[in-house]
Image (cartoon, rainbow, N blue to C red):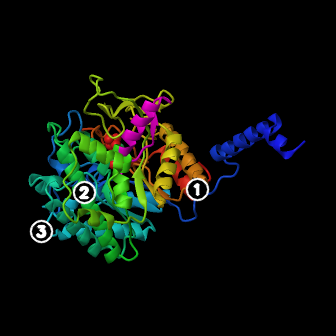
């Protein structure tokens, strides 16, 4: 037999198939798992307006979250979890769980009650005290500068549509670096900028009654990008040891079927939901598909001279992102009636006529609040982002909103939350084994807080806060079952989940 015959023989063909199967198998199932890195940043997240309360204390100004119309059957954010007055107790509980990091946001209006102008010393003091308390417990602060709570005074002047807000933000960032830059290593610029553009009505950053504002929104987006790029540059200048990155909400998008048109729809959705934001943050350029979409819809922003240079100057050190679940898209034809829908929220998108149509994924279960649960999609998302940008990643949100119940003996048995987090941590480890550089994992949320639009009843925390939608009760803190579980996860560096 000649070598030529060997290569064309059926036996050799079978060998090739087996080899392929084996290598695919290894890629999906890995024989040996890598460990979480030694200094992995285990922690959890909150945001200022959802957890702090004290909405009008110590010189704080009002943000758009304080002035927006309160959603029916949900509470306002005046007291939230009253973390402002309980922060020492809360940090002690975070330390008891073994947090290596705590991701929280700074309320812009505590520092600048009017967004610009006079600094409020009591605001600086509160965050200095919080940071010191964390450091005293060996917890690394991971600070979001802006989490949905634009100063109302700036909103009155046009908010992000007004280019002056870019300077106001950079000035705010400068004050943060001046005051906390020596103690804080990890900074996040803007939380879920993509969701403020796509679902601003649900999360209260856009007036729900506003019509035809797409063009304005993409101009706002451009301004936020400019603010972000300048802030990242400033961080590197002012805080030599500081590390900074964006924090959008990113999800893999599946095509509903293998029909090529569905694949295109998934790519479209991914471009306008994910890559528009990350391509700009990481590469300083507009994603081509997203840009064409905006031009075709006549909603592209005006780019002033010099803007693209500014955008190129950002250079994040890492990419932080929030992940709750994947999304699924199918083709949407221009002639499809009724496909153009508004509404939805961070994880539920109905679609856009001629671009994509949101679809259900029959393979996935849902939370009590209708969000799909997709741990494997967490791995695909981690892989996609890392492959695309080659920057270290930090997960800044991931979690399950549920109706928790206090049992008669005072315990809270949130096995469903443990199950959700366990499966996601499992996938994070697989992604690390795949080669993804993951620096940290911060589920949402460290402690119960108010959901963006579904009230206090939608709880996410490891720590229960004893209040209801409208009855503030005693706001005492109770450790849920997940508290003890997560404590052990951290103690064993993710070995025991
Ligand atoms: C993210 C936000 O979109 O999801 C958080 O960054 C939010 O602020 C979290 O709370 C969960 O969403 P929701 O709508 O259930 O509060």
Q: Earlier in the sequence, mark 2 or mark 3?
A: 3
Marker disc for residue 435: 1
Residue of label 2: 224
- Comparing marks 3 and 1, which lies closer to the viewer? 1
Secondary element at tag 1: loop
Out of 474 and 50, give the one closest to the viewer: 50
- Alpha carbon separation for disc pair 2 and 3: 20 Å
Quick check: can you spot residue 262? yes
Residue of label 3: 117
Image quadrant holding the N terminus, namely: top right
- Comparing marks 2 and 3, which lies closer to the viewer? 2
Pinpoint residue 236: horizontal percent, then vertical percent.
35, 73
Q: Residue furthest left?
A: 157
Residue at 12%, 61% (x, y): give it: 114
The quadrant holding residue 296 is top left
Residue at 17%, 59% (x, y): give it: 57
Secondary element at tag 3: loop
Pinpoint residue 108: horizontal percent, then vertical percent.
22, 60
Residue at 67%, 48% (x, y): give it: 30
Task: Point out the stretch of residues depicted in magenta.
Answer: 248-271
Quick check: can you spot residue 60? no
Above or below for 474 versus 117 = above
Q: Earlier in the sequence, mark 3 or mark 1?
A: 3
Left of 181 or right of it: where is 408? right
Marker disc for residue 271: none
Out of 109 and 468, give the one closest to the viewer: 109
């Amino acid at each position: 037999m000649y070598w030529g015959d060997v290569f064309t023989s059926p036996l050799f063909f079978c060998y090739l198939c087996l080899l392929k199967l084996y290598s695919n198998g290894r890629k999906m199932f890995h024989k040996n798992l890598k460990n979480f890195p030694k200094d992995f940043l285990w922690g959890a997240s909150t945001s200022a307006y959802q957890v702090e309360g004290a909405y009008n204390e110590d010189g704080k100004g009002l943000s758009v979250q304080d002035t927006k119309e309160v959603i029916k059957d949900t509470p306002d954010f005046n007291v939230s979890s009253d973390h402002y007055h309980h922060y020492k107790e809360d940090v002690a509980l975070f330390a008891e769980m073994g947090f290596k990091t705590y991701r929280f946001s700074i309320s812009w209006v505590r520092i600048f009650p009017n967004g610009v102008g006079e600094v409020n010393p009591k605001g600086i003091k509160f965050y200095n005290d919080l940071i010191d308390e964390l450091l005293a417990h060996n917890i690394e602060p991971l600070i979001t500068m802006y989490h949905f709570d634009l100063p109302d005074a700036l909103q009155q002047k046009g908010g992000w549509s007004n280019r002056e807000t870019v300077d106001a933000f950079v000035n705010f960032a400068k004050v943060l670096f001046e005051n906390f830059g020596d103690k804080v290593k990890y900074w996040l610029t803007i939380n879920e900028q993509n969701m403020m553009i796509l679902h601003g009505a649900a999360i209260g950053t856009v007036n729900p009654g506003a019509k035809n504002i797409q063009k304005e929104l993409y101009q706002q987006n451009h301004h936020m990008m400019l603010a972000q790029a300048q802030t990242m540059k400033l961080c590197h200048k002012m805080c030599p040891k500081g590390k900074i990155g964006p924090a959008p909400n990113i999800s893999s998008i599946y095509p509903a079927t293998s029909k090529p048109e569905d694949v295109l729809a998934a790519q479209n959705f991914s471009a306008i939901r994910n890559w528009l934001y990350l391509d700009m943050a990481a590469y300083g350029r507009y994603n081509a598909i997203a840009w064409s979409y905006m031009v075709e819809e006549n909603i592209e922003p005006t780019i002033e001279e010099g803007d693209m240079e500014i955008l190129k100057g950002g250079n994040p050190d890492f990419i932080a992102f929030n992940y709750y679940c994947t999304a699924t898209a199918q083709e949407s034809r221009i002639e499809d009636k009724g496909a153009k829908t508004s509404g939805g929220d961070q994880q539920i998108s109905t679609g856009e006529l001629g671009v994509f149509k949101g679809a259900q994924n029959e393979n996935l279960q849902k939370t009590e609040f209708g969000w799909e649960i997709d741990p494997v999609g967490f791995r695909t998302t981690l892989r996609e982002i890392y492959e695309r940008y080659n920057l270290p990643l930090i997960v800044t949100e991931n979690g399950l909103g549920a109706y928790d119940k206090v049992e008669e003996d005072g315990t809270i048995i949130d096995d469903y939350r443990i199950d959700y987090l366990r499966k996601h941590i499992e996938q994070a480890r697989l992604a690390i084994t795949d080669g993804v550089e993951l620096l940290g994992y911060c589920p949402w949320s460290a402690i119960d807080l108010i959901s963006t639009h579904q009230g206090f009843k939608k709880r996410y925390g490891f720590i229960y806060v004893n209040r209801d939608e409208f009855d503030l009760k005693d706001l005492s803190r109770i450790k849920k079952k997940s508290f003890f579980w997560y404590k052990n996860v951290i103690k064993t560096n993710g070995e025991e989940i």
